[in-house]
Every structure is written in C-alpha cells, then in structure tokens.
Image (cartoon, grey):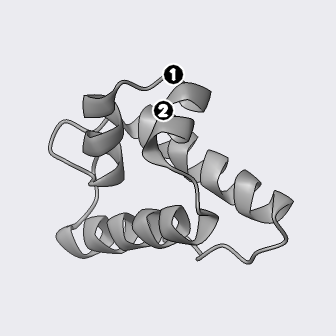
Amino acid sequence: MSLTPEQRNQVEKELRDNFKLSGLTPEVIQADLAFNHEQFEETINLGPTADEAAVSRLRNYLVEKLNEQGKEPSSYSE
C-alpha cells in the first residue's frame, strides 16, 4: 500500500476502532471474508504484507456491519 506512515497509522487505528465497536470476533470475520488467521492479523494490523484489496474488503465489511447495528463507524482517511 502506498500510504504515508501517518496515513497507515490512521487507517490501522480506524480499522481497530471499528472492529472493537462491531463486537464481532476475529473468527466470525475470518469466516465471513474467507480470511485465514494470519491474513486477518496482517490486515487488521496493516502489516508490511497487508494486501490493499483485503484492507478494503475488511474496511467495507466493518462499515456494513456497524451500519446494520445502527452504530456510527469511525471515518476512514483517504
């Protein structure tokens, strides 16, 4: 991903905030998105090998789930 260090930190924070707010377990998310444990961890932590498409899928999934729950997701940086 071609993000500045500040952008990476912000995206990682927002993913984690929305994950926590969703109340979903890693196992539920992994099953829904067909991620294995390592892929989930790398994506949620925005690790060095995090796939941009996986980050987008996780971001969109969390926003969708929060909207379904009537919760306001943390906004994402562009």
Quarter that holds the N terminus: top left
Q: Would residue 30 be visible to someone looking at this image? A: yes
Q: Residues within 10 Å of mark 2 (few under 14, many from 20)?
A: some
Q: Position of residue 41 (x, y in %)?
A: 28, 43
Q: Position of residue 5 (x, y in %)?
A: 18, 69
Most foreground residue, 28 or 55: 28
Residue found 72% across the figure and 63% down from its top: 66
The amino acid sitting under disc 2 is Gln
Residue underneath mark 1 = 34
Badge 2 vs badge 1, beta-carbon distance below 8 Å: yes
**Residue 46 vertical position relative to residue 49 in the rendered view, above or below:** below
Most foreground residue, 1 or 46: 46
Q: Residues within 10 Å of mark 1 (few under 14, many from 20)?
A: few
**Callout 1: SS:** loop
Most foreground residue, 30 or 2: 30
Alpha carbon of mark 2 to alpha carbon of mark 1: how far? 5 Å
Most foreground residue, 28 or 78: 28
In which quadrant of the rendered view does residue 63 lie?
A: bottom right
Residue found 49% across the figure and 71% down from its top: 77
The amino acid sitting under disc 1 is Ala
Q: Position of residue 29 (x, y in %)?
A: 54, 39
Q: Is residue 40 left or right of residue 24?
A: left
Mark number displayed over residue 30: 2
